[in-house]
Image (spheres, rainbow, N blue to C red):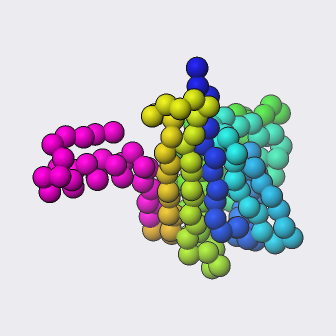
Amino acid sequence: MADYYTPTVVDPMIPLAAMLPIERMFLAQVFDEELTSETAYYYSEEGASDLISLPSADVRAALDAATPETSRLAQKLIDEQPDAILGEDDIDLDMCGDLWPDVLQDIVRRSPDLDHLTVTMAFTATKMRPDGFGGLAMLITAATIRSESTHTLFDRFYKEAAANGEISHGDS
């Protein structure tokens, strides 16, 4: 059985002042975090975490600086975890892979110093299998999150080549 990995890099480094405390707490659980005095670098050698746990007391304190209008993460927590936020147990968030691009976009939207972030992901596996390799590129601006995987890129190549009569069939 193959093990699958998704090394990921977020670029450029994000100014600490651009992040709300709840976003920083969240991103530090989803990715590995390296700090300088003014910035945070987010990456993951194996892939972003889909399931994270946040201490409820820390979440309560971090939410004081956030509003649902400026942070989709704050809105999600308030809407989906109101009892957990007021409790003493950790708050478990699942499917973080669906949420972290929105968190990064919210940071770009509010930041006067960032007009975009890029996310580069490599798909790798411990065995040489066709479904275990490739990648994904993402460009996050205040207005849009654009992403494309190597699989969708190949699909476009196949359609173009077939339309030009270069190949008779092909798909990934």
Q: Which one is in front, 68 or 98?
A: 98
Instruction: Decide: is 140 above or below 49.
Output: below
Q: Residue at x 86, y 70 (%)?
A: 37
Task: Locate residue 9: give its quadrant.
Answer: bottom right
Q: Is residue 153 magenta?
A: yes
Image spot of residue 85 (x, y percent): 73, 40
Q: Quadrant of the N terminus?
A: top right
Task: Locate residue 49: give its quadrant.
Answer: top right
Instruction: Report the residue that reaches farthest toward the top.
Output: 1
Left or right: where does residue 168 sit relative to residue 89? Answer: left
Image spot of residue 113 (x, y percent): 65, 79
Q: Residue at x 64, y 42 (%)?
A: 47
The answer to whether any part of residue 82 appears in the image is no
Q: Is residue 91 magenta?
A: no
Q: Which one is in front, 132 or 102?
A: 132
Please give the range of residues in magenta: 144-172
Image spot of residue 83 (x, y percent): 70, 34
Image spot of residue 19 (x, y percent): 71, 64
Q: Residue at x 18, y 47 (%)?
A: 167
Instruction: Decide: is 94 above or below 34.
Output: above
